[in-house]
């Protein structure tokens, strides 16, 4: 057994951590949030040049990593540094480009020349109605897509989008250029910074990437690992900042961390964070086995991180008091990020239901 | 035991409903219902409507323009207005300063300030907390030094809610450094237009501006603006805590929000069926509803005791803790219901006159902001930790 991340990954972590400390400091974050794209394009380019994005993908397609632990440590640093940018979109779209063996397109994404997004879930209308599944129609050798997808990360900045659509033979992944005809984009900022958009496709030309629906599942599973590691890192930052505050903030003549009521709450928070960290490790460790086992541990991780995430975000703010409510304090941004990660790729209830279903299948009982 | 309201109370409820149907502008109730931002003018408009009917300061004694309502009538009024999505009454002048003036202020102060609170001439804000004095309020340092007919005030207040609109601020200031810390505090009324006052907005985590820092540099305040006696301010401040706070649990507001939440749970599809049929979500919703039903009765029991002359201290703390927890749980379930659509933040959609298409379900726009913004509920007005201390000492005797 070995819980170390290994020398190579440590170097990757150090490189990314130094780069983010330098390029994505608080001032840069404020500027990025104000910008139309919602992220710092120069930072993104610099990161691509450092080869960071390549760590998310395998050597056979021009990357130099791609294992679940590689993904985990990169997203851990994203959590710690809190830069905005199409990290998850790049991973999800890239995993399907990888599965399709589209080395050229993926190379542009890894190199920062092209911004990729991933559109999977259907758009929801003002009245709560869920859009029909996006459909793919083949005519001769070419495909067109029609449908609407909602909350697509960094859609406004994307050059290409990997879109999932029903072919009649199952769910498949397609590549769509955002500049193509029949592609309509409405973008907007997000509560925790960054941007997303609604994507409407009307007979938009598309290139088939893969008709293997399990490749889509695998990409989503990689996304689950990424968000779990990101959330665990955000939690650790919130814990450290809150501990520091408990040690230094004085009321009634003593540091508030001397009050037993607060000590015990902080003890619970730190215990839960260790559990969440273990859940994130499990999600990566059981990734390469069979798909059901992978998804069961993915669901366990998303459930745990959603549940613990709420506790940690709320306690971090509460233990800070009023100052924890302010924009000026980075803590509030980490808390927002943590809560919002629970709204990405399914929330804790959805993953709990999924865990129950997958466990039932495993033991041969009906769900 | 009998939990029915009296026929008189029920008749009163009807009267309130009639009034709301007739007088509450749809424009305002829609803004409240959909979570749009209320402007100062919106709040003043609602105050004026209530004042015309004589219901604005319903908890004041009759001689100052109050209604003489029982605590139960006030509860009914507060519940009905919340259910009708009326704007909340801004409490600083009406509910915080006025009771102190009426009990401890001079006749002259009451005659001058109370009518101006009623007719909206003066907008008040509260100057209690300081950067170093939050839960430990008695450690406050803002100093008022007597010089002839004036106090010279120096220091800083913070978390001053809606201070950007205020004409006046009521402040706890230090007038003595001798003896117990609580015994050197005075209650002072300060004109916000006085030279030496600077208001700096604090941006909150949801991007909104509703609280401020207020800086005092050699601000001259007439001695006539002292309420009651010098160095007795702590007693007056504490009076607010024992003053009957019938609405501290916000039961009416929670009932209104729960109705909205149930509608949302029914109209939101998750995995091909309504969220209200999702076992986990349904369980969360059910637990919330049970807690709120229990809270309603707890609140009525406290009101009943208050009506019989028992001043609620620790009970107020219980109502504050659980009432705010329920509100926060509702906000939590709203954001959960929004799923991915809790993430978009279209700030313009929260302002009146927004004509654009909403992103996602029309109710989803403000839910994440409200969730984050309402983390304040368990922090302000005496944090829930401070409230638990009060219960520990006042009820449990530990």
Image (spheres, rainbow, N blue to C red):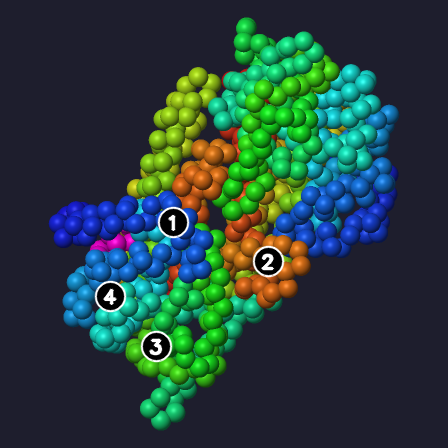
Specify the segment rendered in magenta.
A69-77
How many numbered markers are drawn?
4
* Chain holding disc 4: A
Residue with the mark numbered 3: A175
* Chain holding disc 1: A
Q: Does any portion of residue B7 appear in the rendered image?
A: no
Disc 4 element: loop
Disc 2 element: helix
Look at discs 3 and 1 and give the one toward the viewer. 1
- Mark 2 Cα within 10 Å, few/some/many (few <14, many 20+)? many
- Distance, label 1 to label 4, CA atoms, is 22 Å
Horizontal side of residue A92 vs A326, given as left or right: left
Horizontal side of residue A329 vs B321, given as left or right: left
Residue B144 % position (x, y): 60, 15
- Distance, label 3 to label 1, CA atoms, is 31 Å
Residue with the mark numbered 1: A29
Residue with the mark numbered 2: B349
* Chain holding disc 3: A
- Mark 3 Cα within 10 Å, few/some/many (few <14, many 20+)? many
* Chain holding disc 2: B
Residue with the mark numbered 4: A111
Look at discs 3 and 4 and give the one toward the viewer. 4
Q: At 67% across and 19% down in the image, what residue appears?
A: B221
Mark 3 vs 1: CB contact within 8 A = no
- Quarter assignment of residue A216: bottom left
């Amino acid at each position: 057994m070995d819980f170390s991340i290994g020398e190579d990954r440590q170097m990757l972590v150090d490189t990314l951590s130094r780069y983010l400390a330098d390029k994505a400091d608080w001032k840069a974050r404020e500027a990025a949030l104000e910008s139309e794209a919602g992220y710092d394009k120069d930072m993104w380019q610099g990161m691509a040049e450092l080869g960071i994005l390549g760590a998310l993908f395998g050597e056979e397609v021009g990357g130099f990593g791609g294992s679940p632990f590689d993904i985990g440590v990169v997203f851990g640093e994203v959590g710690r540094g809190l830069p905005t940018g199409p990290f998850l979109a790049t991973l999800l779209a890239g995993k399907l480009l990888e599965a399709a063996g589209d080395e050229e397109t993926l190379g542009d994404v890894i190199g920062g020349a092209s911004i990729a997004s991933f559109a999977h879930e259907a758009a929801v209308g003002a009245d709560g109605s869920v859009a029909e599944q996006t459909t793919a129609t083949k005519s001769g050798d070419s495909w067109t897509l029609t449908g609407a997808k909602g909350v697509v990360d960094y859609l406004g900045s994307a050059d290409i989008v990997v879109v999932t659509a029903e072919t009649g033979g199952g769910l498949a992944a397609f590549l769509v250029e955002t500049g193509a005809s029949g592609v309509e984009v409405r973008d907007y900022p997000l509560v925790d910074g960054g941007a997303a958009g609604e994507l409407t496709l009307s007979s938009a030309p598309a290139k088939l990437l893969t008709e293997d629906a399990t490749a889509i599942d695998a990409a989503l599973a990689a996304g689950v690992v990424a968000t779990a590691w990101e959330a665990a890192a955000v939690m650790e930052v919130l814990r450290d900042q809150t501990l520091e505050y408990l040690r230094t903030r004085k009321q009634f003549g003593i540091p508030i961390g001397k009050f037993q009521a607060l000590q015990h709450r902080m003890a619970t928070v730190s215990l839960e964070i260790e559990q969440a960290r273990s859940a994130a490790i499990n999600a990566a460790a059981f990734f390469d086995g069979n798909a059901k086992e992978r998804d069961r541990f993915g669901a366990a991780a998303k459930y745990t991180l959603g549940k613990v995430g709420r506790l940690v975000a709320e306690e971090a703010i509460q233990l800070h008091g009023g100052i924890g409510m302010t924009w000026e304090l980075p803590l509030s941004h980490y808390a927002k990020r943590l809560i919002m990660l629970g709204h990405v790729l399914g929330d804790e209830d959805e993953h709990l239901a999924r865990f129950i279903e997958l466990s039932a299948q495993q033991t041969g009982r009906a769900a | 035991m009998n939990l029915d309201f009296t026929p008189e109370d029920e008749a009163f409820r009807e009267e309130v409903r009639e009034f709301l149907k007739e007088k509450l502008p749809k424009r305002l109730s829609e803004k409240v219902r959909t979570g749009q931002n209320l402007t100062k003018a919106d709040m003043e408009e609602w105050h004026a409507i209530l004042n015309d009917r004589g219901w604005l300061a319903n908890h004041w004694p009759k001689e100052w323009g109050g209604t003489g309502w029982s605590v139960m009538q006030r509860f009914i009024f507060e519940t009905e207005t919340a259910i009708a999505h009326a704007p909340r009454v801004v409490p600083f002048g009406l509910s915080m300063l006025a009771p102190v003036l009426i009990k401890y202020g001079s006749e002259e102060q009451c005659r001058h300030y109370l009518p101006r609170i009623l007719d909206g001439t003066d907008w008040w804000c509260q100057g209690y907390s300081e950067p170093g004095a939050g839960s430990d309020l008695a450690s406050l340092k803002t100093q008022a030094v007597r010089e002839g007919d004036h106090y010279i005030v120096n220091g800083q207040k913070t978390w001053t809610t809606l201070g950007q609109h205020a004409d006046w601020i009521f402040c706890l200031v230090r007038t003595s450094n001798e003896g117990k810390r609580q015994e050197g505090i005075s209650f002072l009324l300060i004109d916000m237009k006085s030279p030496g006052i600077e208001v700096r907005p604090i941006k909150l985590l949801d991007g909104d501006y509703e609280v401020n820092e207020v800086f005092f540099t050699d601000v001259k305040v007439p001695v006539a603006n002292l309420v009651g006696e010098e160095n007795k301010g702590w007693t007056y401040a504490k009076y607010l805590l024992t003053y009957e706070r019938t609405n501290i649990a916000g039961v009416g507001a929670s009932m209104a929000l729960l109705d909205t939440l149930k509608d949302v749970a029914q109209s939101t599809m998750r995995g091909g069926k309504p969220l209200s049929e999702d076992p986990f979500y349904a369980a969360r919703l059910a637990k919330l509803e049970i807690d709120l039903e229990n809270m309603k009765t707890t609140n009525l029991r406290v009101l009943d005791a208050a009506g019989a002359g028992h001043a609620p201290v620790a009970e107020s703390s219980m109502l504050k803790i659980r009432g705010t927890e329920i509100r926060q749980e509702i906000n939590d379930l709203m954001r959960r219901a929004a799923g991915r659509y809790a993430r978009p933040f279209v700030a313009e959609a929260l302002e009146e006159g927004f004509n654009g298409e909403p992103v996602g379900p029309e109710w989803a726009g403000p839910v994440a902001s409200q969730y984050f913004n309402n983390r304040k509920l368990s922090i302000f007005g005496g944090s829930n930790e401070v409230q638990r201390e009060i219960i520990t000492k006042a009820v449990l005797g530990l």
